[in-house]
Image (tube, rainbow, N blue to C red):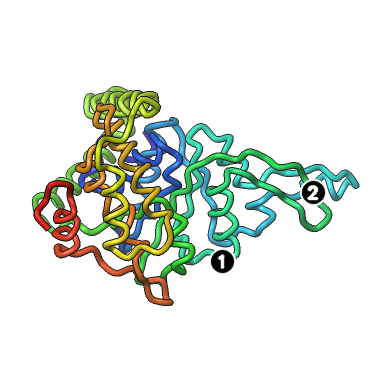
Amino acid sequence: MPILPYSLLVGQDELRTALEIAYVNPAVGGVLATGQRGTAKTTTVRAFSWMISGGLPVTLPIGATDDRVLGGWQIRKLMEGVAEPADGLLVEAARSPAQILFVDEINLLDDYLVNIILDVVSTGVLHVQREGRAQELQQVRFNLIGTMNPDEGGLRPQLLDRFGLMAEVVPEEDPKQRLRIIETVLQFEAEREKADSPFLAKASEGEAARKAELEAARKRLREVVYGPDTLAYCARLAAAFRVVGHRGDLVLGQASRALAAIDGVTAVTPQHVRRMAKSALAHRRSATESGSVAPWTAEDDTQAESLLPGSAR
């Protein structure tokens, strides 16, 4: 195992839930992980990709050109006088085992490229027609996973809205949890070169078990239906939090459906919706021009609880 196994990660509950939901139901539309440096955002994404596919995700570097993203021409062939297309990272991600495109520090990427990528994620269609190259529409399906450190700048509200879910990653404050992180990482580094390690064998068993559970949830998803008052609760939450547009309502419903599938049930309840409210709605509320997102507070939790069907309002 070249990286820390997913089954050995300590904490990261919000991000792990978001990644699993986007995998079970790709219609959710990707995940944005936001948090300060050193909070293991990238480690978690790579560990998840390794668990579900045995490989790292296709990664878009910050300095990537639009040719590299969308596809262009093979330079060597052009120098030989032959025009031969070269696939871009979007197609590579769609064809990769994990079907993930990972963009670290996405807030530092040019808005033009971010907008193109998010549009392809939303439509599932890639159409390249530029600089002498035109190609037929391609079906391109992948999960976009982005990370950002809000201290280094934000994303415009229009771009934030295009991410299905946002997961806030915060440093562990409990000394016991911080100790677990240290011990786990150091033990992994000590064991990773051993040919026969009970520690890593147990981690591999945990990986296989969780992957099997998620695969079963993907199959179960088609059987999951919305229970009474569930969609009405989605609409009430979106209205109460003054979410602009209707994408938040739809994502909340899709994410809740995936969560029900992961829980092993075939009916979405308002409690599933309640658990996904922050991830689906927090980044769709009013934000500043710099792209900063208003924090989700205890008062927000109380408001969401008060809107549950049957609650006294």
Residue at left offset 30%, top offset 26%:
213
Residue type at mark 1 is: Asp
Tag of residue 223: none
Q: CA distance from mark 2 to mark 1?
A: 23 Å
Q: How many numbered marks appear?
A: 2
Q: Is residue 210 visible?
A: yes
Tell me residue 276's x, y (percent). Answer: 27, 48
Q: Is residue 47 visible?
A: no
Residue at left offset 43%, top offset 30%:
54
Residue type at mark 2 is: Ala
Left/right placement of residue 181 relative to residue 48 reads left
User: Is 190 located above or below residue 177 in the figure?
Assistant: above
Tell me residue 115's x, y (percent). Answer: 56, 60
Residue at left offset 21%, top offset 47%:
11
Q: Residues within 10 Å of mark 1 (few under 14, many from 20)?
A: few
Q: Tag 1 or tag 2, which sits nearer the N-term?
A: 1
Return the residue at label 2: 134
Tell me residue 70's x, y (percent). Answer: 66, 51
Q: Residues within 10 Å of mark 2 (few under 14, many from 20)?
A: few
Residue at left offset 22%, top offset 29%:
199
User: Is 67 located above or below residue 275 in the figure?
Assistant: below
Left/right placement of residue 184 relative to residue 91 reads left
Return the residue at label 1: 110
